[in-house]
Image (cartoon, grey):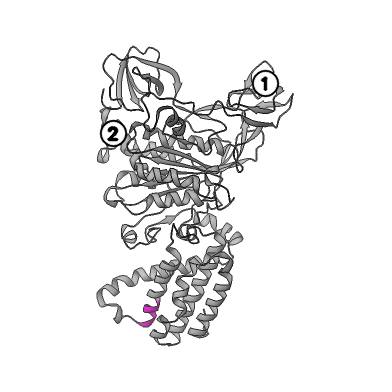
Amino acid sequence: MAGPTVQARGLSGCFMNEIARVGPWGLTGEIIRIEGDLATIQVYEETVGLKVGDPVRTTGELLSVELGPGLVGEIFDGIQRPLPRLSALSGDFIQKGAEAKRLDRERLWSFEARVKKGDLVEWGTILGAVKETPRISHLVFAAKGVRGLVDEVREGDFAVTEPVVILEGGETITMRQKWNVREPRPVRGRLPLETPLLTGQRTVDTLFPIAEGGTAVIPGGFGSGKTVIEQTIAKYASADLIVYIGCGERGNEMADTLSQFPRLTDPYAGRPLMERTILIANTSNMPVAAREASIFTGVTIAEYYRDMGYRVAVLADSTSRWAEALREISSRLEEIPGEEGYPTYLASRLSAFYERAGRFLLIGPDEKRTGSVTIIGAVSPPGGDFSEPVTQASLQMASTFWALDTDLANQRHFPAINWRMSFSLTYPSLLKWYRQLASSEWSSLVREVHEVLQQEEDLAEIVRIIGLDSVADRERVLLEAARMLREGYLRQSAVHPVDAYCSIRRQVKLLSTFVFCTGRMFAAAERGLPLDLILGAPPLEALLRLKEVCDEDLDVRIAELRRDFSTSLGAGVV
């Protein structure tokens, strides 16, 4: 026995990935190696107190999740144990072998049938619906392997284990399913990624958008704001459902998340945020082995709601701590290590997670039903070194890369996304959506921002060598315009009541105003207006504060700013 890994003999008929119960407490474990009659078991709970000779029994089941009404608004650990109900049973500290039903067996759900006697039922057929929350209508559909004609339909209030549909021949269907977490739920086919997942964060939505069904990686050193940006996206993303996975997070950060989310309001529906959120908490002081399972638990739940036709976003914080758990387990198995001690199969395990993202045609009689899973994973490279294995392996699967910069974070510029290192491979496919639903001028506005930031980068080295006072007036104006874009548009406060969330229509208004005003500054410099008059123009400070103006007053304030810039700097061609 070594830490969470134990070995057992005499488990005849056991198979790989089978769930076993270990010791007198019945600790949950998974068989990860079989050599003759010797089975190696990865235990997902604390193993202190186990001794040689303790009993081990197999269950005949794979590591699975229970799926059905009651998941939304719940808080689970890495192997889907409901933490609030465990706390009620065992107190603040979970006892060894503590168990609680993953879905509440006592709660009744009002089932409204969508099939009738004589209808053909097969995999993916929608049998009925349950109002899980005011926003989420939970579709009950036939599981894999089910096929037959409906003999009886029951409507009314039922628990998840009670039959709601009975087929000819006596087969019963309940609202509860089980699914192996390591097996992706099948789909009919993949669809192109053409719609952005709006996050309410200007740097992301404007410069480096992520598509619905896409993947994003957020690497950053300690203190660069990974957890804050993931939590902010979880609060404001335009997804129907959020699955937030705290994988190896510090307990105080996860406690903040668990205390904040129930008090937050969904900006799209005006309802409590937990009515569209599922939290999976596997903190750093919990058994390390359960981290390896936590991200697969989360993405399996996400796929289940995707199969109902929802747009689901999965946020994993962080995959580095998941990889550390994988490394620890691999070392206890005495496997040959790869780079920096990580197992040689690190990249394939990461890809098995990220490849479950996408926009899909769903299985079922209705061949046009679609759903999506978007995956956003944070990476914590030691020392902020993006060349380390987890970051590099994640980059191979990511379509969007948001590189967090410690220098920006130290300057209190948040989100600290480095616009020189970040990219979005799906941006070209999203342009049509932006032009039709955001602004016909979106491409030119974004291009203007990129050009100003790039020219500032090119000037930075020259300024460091010869000094700011030695550069030409137009370059001085360029540097000021870049500063205004960075501080007035890209910089965003996660706690300001107005600035924390910025809708795409608000982004268009702000961005077009910044481009107009900086254009007036360039035009004034070209006409030879003195530099002091340009850089000292009264409207500059008001422009920097524009992002804090509420929506009701924004249009009026923008009109005033445009008039003030034209008056102060004179008419010019932009």
Label at residue 166: 1
**Which numbered tag is attached to residue 342?**
none
Query: In the image, residue 518 lies at what x, y percent?
Result: 46, 75
Q: Quadrant of the N terminus?
A: top left
- Amino acid type, callout 1: Ile
Whether residue 249 can be seen here: no
- Distance between the Cα atoms at labels 2 and 1? 47 Å
Label 2 secondary element: helix
Q: Any magenta on residue 382? A: no
Q: Which mark is residue 328?
A: 2
In percent of width and height, residue 17 lies at 40, 24
Residue 194 percent across, percent down from the top left: 56, 51
Q: Is residue 212 above or below residue 43?
A: below
Q: Residue at x 42, y 82 (%)?
A: 534
Q: From which residue to which does the magenta span run?
A: 472-477
Residue 286 visible in the picture: yes
Q: Nearer the viewer, mark 2 or mark 1?
A: 1
As drawn, is 16 to the left or to the right of 137?
A: left
Packing grade of label 2 (10 A; few <14, some 14-19, many >=20) is some
Viewer-side residue, 333 vs 45: 45
476 drawn magenta: yes
Q: Quadrant of residue 38?
A: top left
Q: Where does the image place residue 137, in percent across and percent down from the top left?
A: 62, 39
- The amino acid type of the residue labelled 2 equals Glu
Tell me: residue 404, above or below residue 102.
below
Look at the numbered disc 1 and give the secondary structure of its residue.
Answer: strand
Q: Within 10 angstroms of label 1, few (less than 14), some, or many (20 or more) residues?
A: some
Residue occupying image coordinates x 52% and y 37%: 303
In this rendering, is residue 78 above or below 317? above
The answer to whether 157 appears left or right of 219 in the picture is right
Quadrant hosting residue 124? top right
